[in-house]
């Protein structure tokens, strides 16, 4: 399922590209993968909020939600985006699940490092590595 950008305006953070966020959600072997593209800030955050809420409220195969957020096409993320991800992580953990991140861009990785959020999330270098790690973990149980 692809959530089209809610609106557009000239980019304040990039090269004049539209300031929009696209969220694609796809199930992947017991994990809900959310692929983010564009810019995540106060004005563009609603599609991510909606997608995370739906993923967290949907019954998971093992009973607990396991979310994986791919950040490799996220050009910008501000404190609003960080807070949305942190809250979703707490909700997933409270339900006995987990939320992990994959492929943060340099800008996003820097923000996570400066805020200490990189110590809170399990962060994978890319989506394929994250999915492989998840499958290996499933085989161990």
Image (cartoon, helix red, strand yellow):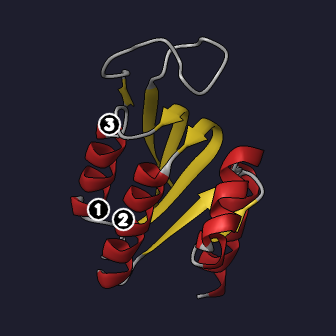
Q: Are marks 1 and 3 in contact (CB under 8 Å)?
A: no
Q: CA distance from mark 2 to mark 1?
A: 8 Å
Q: Quadrant of residue 88?
A: bottom left
The correct choice, above or below, for 87 with respect to 75 in the image is below
Q: CA distance from mark 1 to mark 3?
A: 14 Å
**Residue 56 - label:** 1
Q: Earlier in the sequence, mark 2 or mark 1?
A: 1
Q: Position of residue 62 (x, y in %)?
A: 37, 75
The correct choice, above or below, for 93 with respect to 61 in the image is below
15 and 124: which is toward the camera:
15
Query: What is the secondary structure assignment of the residue under circle 2?
Result: helix
The C terminus, quarter of image? bottom right
Please name the residue shown 35% across and 67% down the image. 87
Label 2 neighbourhood size at 10 Å, few (<14), some (14-19), many (20+)?
many
- Residue on which disc 3 sits: 47
71 and 28: which is toward the camera:
71
Q: Quadrant of residue 16?
A: top right
Q: Position of residue 64 (x, y in %)?
A: 34, 76
30 and 80: which is toward the camera:
80
Q: Position of residue 140 (x, y in %)?
A: 66, 86
**Residue 88 - label:** 2
- Residue, far bottom: 141
Query: What is the secondary structure assignment of the residue under circle 3?
Result: helix
- Could one spot residue 95 in this view of the protein? yes
User: Given this view, does label 1 or label 3 mark the residue nearer the observer?
Assistant: 3
Label 3 neighbourhood size at 10 Å, few (<14), some (14-19), many (20+)?
many
Q: Position of residue 61 (x, y in %)?
A: 35, 67
Q: Are marks 2 and 1 in contact (CB under 8 Å)?
A: yes
The correct choice, above or below, for 19 with respect to 24 in the image is above
């Amino acid at each position: 399922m692809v959530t089209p950008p809610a609106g557009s305006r000239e980019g304040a953070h990039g090269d004049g590209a539209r300031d929009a966020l696209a969220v694609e959600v796809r199930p992947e072997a017991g994990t809900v993968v959310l692929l983010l593209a564009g810019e995540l800030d106060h004005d563009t955050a609603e599609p991510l909020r909606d997608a995370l809420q739906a993923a967290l409220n949907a019954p998971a195969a093992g009973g607990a939600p396991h979310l994986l957020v791919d950040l490799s096409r996220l050009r910008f993320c501000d404190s609003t985006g960080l807070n949305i991800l942190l809250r979703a992580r707490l909700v997933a953990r409270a339900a006995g699940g987990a939320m992990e991140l994959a492929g943060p861009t340099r800008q996003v990785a820097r923000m996570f490092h400066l805020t200490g959020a990189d110590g809170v999330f399990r962060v994978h270098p890319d989506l394929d590595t994250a999915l492989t790690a998840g499958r290996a973990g499933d085989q161990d149980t």
